[in-house]
Image: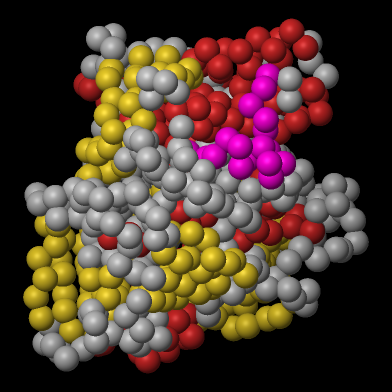
Amino acid sequence: MSRNKWIVLVLALIIGAIAISACSRATPTPEVIEKTVVVTQVVEKTVEVPQTVVVTKEVEKVVEVTPTPISNQFIGSGQLDGNGIPANFFSDIHVRKAFNYCFDWDTYINEVLNGEAVQNIGPLIPGMLGYDPNGPHYSYDPDKCAEEFKQAWDGKLWDTGFRMQIAYNTGNDTRRIIAEILQQNIADVNDKFQIEIIALPWPTFLRNIRSGKLPLFVSGWLEDIHDPHNWAQPFMIGTYAHRQNLPDDMIAKFKELVDKGVAETDPAKRAEIYKKLGQLDYENAIAIRGAVATGRHYEQKWVQGWYYNPIYPGNYYYALSKADDAKDPGTMVVASFGDPETLDPALDYETAGAEIIDNTYETLVFYEKNDPTKFIPQLAESWDISDDGSTYTFHIRKGVKFHNGDELTPEDVAYSFRRGLLQGGSDSPQWLLAEPFFGIGTYDIAELVNPDVEDDPAALQKEDPAKLQDACQKVMDAITFDNDAGTVTMHLAQPWGPFLATIAQSWGSIMDKNWVAENGGWDGTCDTWTKYYAITSEDDPFSKIENGTGPFVLDHWTPGEEVALKRFDGYWRTDPAWEGGPAGPAKLENVIIKNVSEWGTRFAMMQAGDADMAAVPRQNVAQVDPLVGELCEYNLDSKDFTCNPTDNPDGALRLFKGQPGVARTDAMFNFQVK
């Protein structure tokens, strides 16, 4: 996520067939993503929200404008003069509190999420260890909003006014409406406060977040593992903390508690630590925490095999099929929106890319169907854990072929994990592996050389060659292999309870060492690793190609239009992945994920049966519900659904409803715009 989810993650609250999307993961995560549209004009459209009419500007890519003092269109003049904001506008605590008091959670939850959500309190999500439902939090209060604005910037802001832009990713109506609620309520407090809302294609949106240019951005997070550390770390000291440019002293204060929380083994003591972090989150008002919604998934009734695992970034198509009488029974068509950022498992930290990776690559262990806490063998046939919990030995499955025909070896496994750790970079998910291998509080390989050069490849390459060699050797020694014995051994810096959960995700995917080297990737030696450190998706040779062992092969990816997968007939699995699960080649011959940013078009595709699944914004469910002929409601105890016909049993669609969410969309303040 960029420790965002993938994060980036690079995760949203759009609930549909693609169960979350741009969430820093990650969010990245987690995160739902957008269609890339090559348009440079700015267009205006009128958008209606509850009891208001606002004007939203949609910009399809960054447009060059007359340079401001820091050449950034999003902050206008770059000064506190009524025509812009200074780069450090949100460093003022009164500004941040004012924005919080001007956000109307009731409207957001009731009108956008259909009342199927709860306001989030603090950085953790409801139900998580350490989450305090009675903790301090902000509520919509225009009077307090005005009071805080009057104190901001030594009292100058109220009379001077400001102008700025809030960005969201194109097609994500949930994020758009969050921005519109702020826009309207803040203007109601003082008409000198002008906020423009712009829609950016996902790659442009993510690029501007990472470069620190957006003064306020609306983004989401889908958890990587079901543990409070996976929420506290990215929001308070990791992915989003860096994207928000939180001050060093603030991060240091948070870090002390975050590190204590992940190291503590007593659940009661851990809970108290995370409650303290929630208090600090409130006191510093570092973001507007959103709401956690329960899920909805719509599909044609001819779709078979769908189930809900909250940790999945998207659909696991190997488990799916279509009835024989379905339209084109061998092809699954999904109407969603957004493009992957990259298909490199070591770099991708957002859900659109992760969904493709999960269906084309594979990990050592995988989830047992719908349970995010139970694991089954995948590329590892079995594993052993030392008595002290710090050494894992994996027995690698034999006879597995990559899509190009190469046979999987233990060396490929060790190479894949080594490559990820050495490639590092804060925009990747590698912090999740760096901590267990290098120690609590160490998030990147560069920190083993010189923490000051993190995310700076050029500076890293100028460091002492001996230190660079030592850092690489530490990775080599931590992950060893024995091709003859068929094993890979991983030596952790300390016991790490969620280690299997960590390597079960897409960044634990195994790549073909020879294929990577032949296509311009790392050759596996300590002499060359710095050339690939903190590589960007634009420069990554594996952003648009794949060669995994998974049940599907990438057929083609046409950015802005579709990603197409085809069945891998040489897939290795002969026994069911779980009781009653799939085995052999996939039942589906093709999967086509269409990038359709306009909701009306997605809806029409579902009506006509041209899409088997579709991403349905929460505010549009009333339009779709009359088409539902079968309702499946979630049972918390069984972690499964009970399905029954609706009052319209002839309806073409099936609705899965009530599944608990593990994603959230927040509005993030940038303390120092670049």
Residue 520 within the magenta-colored segment of the rendering: yes
Percent position (x, y) of residue 361? 45, 48
Percent position (x, y) of residue 534? 68, 34
Percent position (x, y) of residue 504? 37, 38
Image label count: 0
Q: Is residue 90 left or right of residue 4?
A: right
Is 364 situated above or below 47?
A: above
Q: Is residue 647 left or right of residue 336?
A: left
Q: Which residues are magenta?
A: 510-526
Percent position (x, y) of residue 613? 36, 75
Is 453 situated above or below 541?
A: above
Q: At x 32% / y 40%, what residue is drawn?
A: 378
Q: Is residue 244 visible?
A: no
Q: At x 35% / y 76%, what residue is drawn?
A: 330
Choose between 111 and 539: the one closer to the eye: 539
Q: Is residue 348 left or right of residue 396?
A: right
Which picture quadrant has residue 325? bottom left
